[in-house]
Amino acid sequence: MGLPFIGETLQLISAFKSDNPEPFTDERVGRFGPIFLTHLFGEPTIYSVDPEVNRFILNNEGKLFESSYPSIIAYLHGEYSLLLMKGNLHKKMHSLTVNFTKSALTRGRLLLDMDRLMLFCMDSWSPKLLLLEETKKAKNLRKEFLLIVEGFWSIPLPFFSISYKRAVKAKTKVVEALKLVVKERRSARDEGERKSDILGAILDEKADDEYSDEMIVDLLVSLMLAGFETTSSAMTLAVKFLTESPLALAQLKEEQEKIRDQKGDNELLVWNDYKSMSFTQCVISETLRISNIVGAIFRRTLSDIQMNGYTIPKGWKVLAAIRGVHMNDEYFKDAQSFNPWRWQGDAEMTPANVFIPFGGGPRLCPGYELSRVSISIFLHRLITKYSWEAAEEDKLVFFPLTGTQKRYPINVRPRNPSV
Ligand code: HEM
């Protein structure tokens, strides 16, 4: 359990700041089994790398467990963020987000707009760039979002932590900007104007203004924050893994070039193109498995709970460590190696509860398809427009967020300057 109060927090942080955090989990699993008691961030914490227990924890959200993130993350997301909402309101907003995303991708213009934006961003690329920076460029208020994300793991004491102070200031700026947008859109809606984006869907859902501006703004901030760092890290790491795996890159190139050959040079991608990218999906699954963008999910028990012969007292923290499962040789042969072919056909049958990069149960990530689509578009455009190589050695890190130490510097060249 480690030192009083601090417990094993420092050991955990130092393991996840390296490119090989596995020993932290493996040592404890070796001594105590796949569910063990530790002490993290000031609290006794049950740490589980058992896939069935993890699934049980996620599926019982709102009944036996509830979402419980460190207070600084909660504060920066806002009271009405989807991540913190509870009960019926959460259910309603979660399904609204999932349904909106699904229909905007399959029937709306979202995919076309994302592809257009990708082309626009890539057009401004310089020959040497930091890929992790470029994958975050397509967002307004980008600087503010970066500062908020940096504040997630800071110490929430205004006098001591500069990153905390900066994060709070940035959050205020984002909130003010979005408040204005919500106000304008409410009055436009009252005059009969309809827009087919997520804000339009929320305003239409409750035309009688039951949802306050404050609530809608928190919800929008949380959607943007949750999608911002996660998807850009996954894009960057997919490129890193592909660069280090020439066979996988060659197969992906073949798939993407075939799609491009069937279309006009700059013709935008549509839903059917995305659905035909089968090897690309294997690359994305393998990237998510091995990088574990979200490595663990935090919950708190709502009552005393019996699990595997033990009682977990009410109010205790429980951590469903997804990473510990994804990196276990028992579930994924040679788990440390990047092997997208493991996802092909029936090459490896993974039980549904073993691969859960997007969580599960009532809080299953509402952006799961959206992020797969944007990573696919990004890979399509990168591969068909550019060739590249790593400009420097770079290493993965997993704390405070998953990424690489140097933001993955690469040298890029247009493959066919006339296209
Ligand atoms: C590679 C990209 C992504 C990964 C790996 C990822 C992973 C996750 C995971 C594991 C959760 C579950 C958290 C929990 O149960 O407490 C989650 C929740 C969430 N994600 Fe994602 N996510 C990604 C992209 C996105 C995108 C693009 C969006 C934008 C729509 C998004 C929005 C959210 C939201 C709002 C939640 C909270 C859902 C709730 O509590 O009901 N995510 N994500």
Image (cartoon, rainbow, N blue to C red):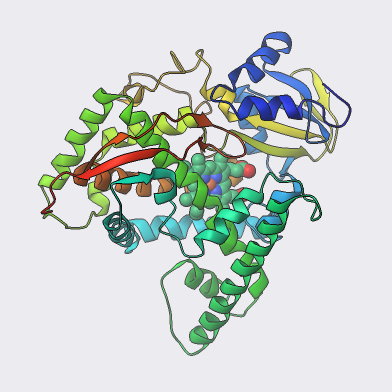
Across and down, in percent, residue 340 comes to 34, 26
Left or right side of 129 for 296: right
Q: Position of residue 67 (x, y in %)?
A: 70, 44
The answer, for residue 263, to whether it is visible in the render is yes
Q: Residue at x 44, y 68 (%)?
A: 197
Left or right, 19 with respect to 11, comes to: left
**Residue 122 image offset from top left, x and y in percent:** 29, 54
Q: Nearer the viewer, residue 125 or 113?
A: 125
Residue 210 in which image quadrant = bottom right
From what the image shows, is residue 126 above or below residue 55?
below
Q: Is residue 1 left or right of residue 116?
A: right
The quadrant where residue 50 appears: top right
Q: Residue at x 40, y 40 (%)?
A: 236
Most foreground residue, 41 or 303: 41
Taking the view exactly as shown, the residue that stands out farthest to the bottom is 191
Which of the image's four quarters has the N terminus? top right
